[in-house]
Image (spheres, grey):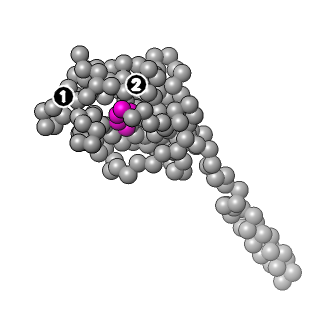
Amino acid sequence: MKKLLTIIASALIMSAITSCDNDDDKTIDTEKPQINASIDGASPANAATFYFGEEIPVKLLLTDNEELGSFSVNIHNNFDHHSHSTEEEGEEHHDHEEGEEHHHHDGEDGDAFQFTQDYTIPAGSTQFLIDTKIALPVKSDDGDEYDGGDYHFMLTVTDKAGFSTFKAFEIKILQR
């Protein structure tokens, strides 16, 4: 009887050990999210022109192999024709609070328009279609008209694992 109890106890212990979750079997998400700008009606596009007092339609598809987290939009002047390597996607990190929005001009750049907005993506999403519009005010907070010219429209998407991808579009924003 003792031998039978030992065999049963050993079998139960082995069963318990082998049925436990093994964290080593879980895969770690190492893939960056993707920004698809080739969907029907995608916007903005490189070389597109928009006007102060109107809106920029934004329609892009975000995807991730595991789970998306958030995205942000940054619009800033490109009067000095700097580059963000817009031909390929890269990493970008922003230090803005969730939902924080900025519309201002910077004395160093004259009355250049700037915009930054962070957005959340519903939990569990592996695909998210951005379909929104961003209003372009005619004047800054101090009443000066914004300078028209070359601008960058940058979209950064971050997945739940913390990987980021960005895409920069070279656009023009002009006064009518």
Judging by the rendered image, the residue that carries numbered circle 2 is: 171
Q: Which quarter of the image is occupied by the N terminus?
A: bottom right
Q: Are marks 2 and 1 in contact (CB under 8 Å)?
A: no
Q: Front-most of 107 and 13? A: 107
Q: Is residue 19 magenta?
A: no
> Which range is magenta?
74-79
- Say if residue 170 shows up in the picture: yes
Pointer 1 residue? 145
Residue 50: x and y in percent read: 33, 20
What residue type is disc 2 on? Ile
Q: Is residue 50 left or right of residue 104?
A: right
Residue at x 62%, y 44% (from the top left corner): 31
Q: Is residue 126 left or right of residue 25?
A: left
- Whether residue 77 appears in magenta in the rendering, the answer is yes
Disc 2 crowd rating (10 Å Cα; few below 14, some 14-19, many 20+) is many
- Residue 11, compared with residue 23, is above or below; it is below
Residue 68 in view (yes/no): no
Crowd tier of the residue under label 1, counting other residues whose Cα lies within 10 Å: few below 14, some 14–19, many 20 or above: some
Q: Secondary structure at mark 1?
A: loop
Check residue 23 in the rendering and tell me which mark sits there, or answer none: none
SS majority, magenta: strand
Q: In the displayed image of the protein, which residue is found farthest to the left?
A: 143
